[in-house]
Amino acid sequence: MAGPFGVLPGLELLQNCASALIAGLNPAVVHNLAKYMALKKVHYLSAMEDVDGDYCEFGVFTGSSFCHSIRCCGRLTRLNPNIARTTFYGFDSFTGFGSLSGDDRHPFYTDGNFATNLRTVERRVRRAAGDMAFKLIPGFFSESLKHGAHDMGIDRIRVVFIDSDTFASASQALAFCGPAMQQGTFIVLDDYFSYRGREDRGVRRAFSEFAAESRIKTRRVLTYGMGGVVLVVSELPLRTQGANA
């Protein structure tokens, strides 16, 4: 029977095949593919805007996103040679989350799901990096981030990628990056809608408090995957702008 959308049996078969294919895809693969595309867009946009600075990733895990960002920037040096000056900083305990407070506890965020091996990750990143500069900084953020970005030689940040899942870790990462942010800094927040969408938990709470305290203004660029958000810093307090000028 033909209808306004063509032959109905054929349409149903096509829809069933598409549904079976999508239902069978591993959700982690779906999310990561969308995340890779989001990172590609972020690096492209920052290259087009000639945003200077380094890349900071919090929650490196196996290094897949970290390596992907390096590859994207390597390709973009033909568009903007200044991108080659980027140093890629990766922060992770490489042993999992450690002890989590009551508000940060989550059924999926456990050491068993997120422990990895620093040496293995470092070898993987070295193969991807080529001539691009990178540093992997092991340790829990309460120790590795306590001195701030400028103390580590990070003057300006071009892209911040927070994939550390919990409020405590995201809050520490944002506080570390804040002094080095500038107009045009892209902030990529994975797991933004975790903890059943609550605004007083996880990465959402961390960013909300950071934005209120630092008085930065951001615009949403896009959402991706299973709950990731990309923002761009559109305005900084005047005293901060002067420090980054």
Image (cartoon, grey):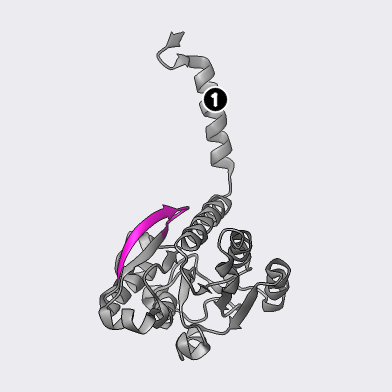
Answer few, some or many: residues within 10 Å of disc 1's Cα (few below 14, many 20 plus, some between 14 and 19): few
Instruction: Look at the image and tell me whether residue 194 can be seen.
Output: no
Could you tell me which quadrant the C terminus lies in?
Answer: bottom left
Magenta stretch: helix, strand or loop mostly: strand
Judge left or right: residue 13 versus residue 185.
Answer: right
Magenta-span inclusion, residue 26: no
* Position above or below: 225 against 82: above
Q: Position of residue 216 (x, y in %)?
A: 29, 73
Instruction: Look at the image and tell me whether residue 16 can be seen.
Output: yes
Q: Quadrant of residue 2?
A: top left
The residue that appears at 41% across and 69% down in the rendered structure is: 185
Residue tagged 1: 14
Q: Nearer the viewer, residue 186 or 85?
A: 85
Judge left or right: residue 176 versus residue 125.
Answer: left
Q: Position of residue 187 (x, y in %)?
A: 42, 67
Q: Nearer the viewer, residue 222 or 195?
A: 222
Q: Of the residues shown, which amino acid type is indicated by label 1? A: Leu
The residue that appears at 41% across and 60% down in the rendered structure is: 230
Q: Position of residue 29 (x, y in %)?
A: 58, 52
The magenta span reads 217-229
Q: Nearer the viewer, residue 98 or 46?
A: 46
What secondary structure is marked by label 1? Answer: helix
Q: Nearer the viewer, residue 169 or 89?
A: 89
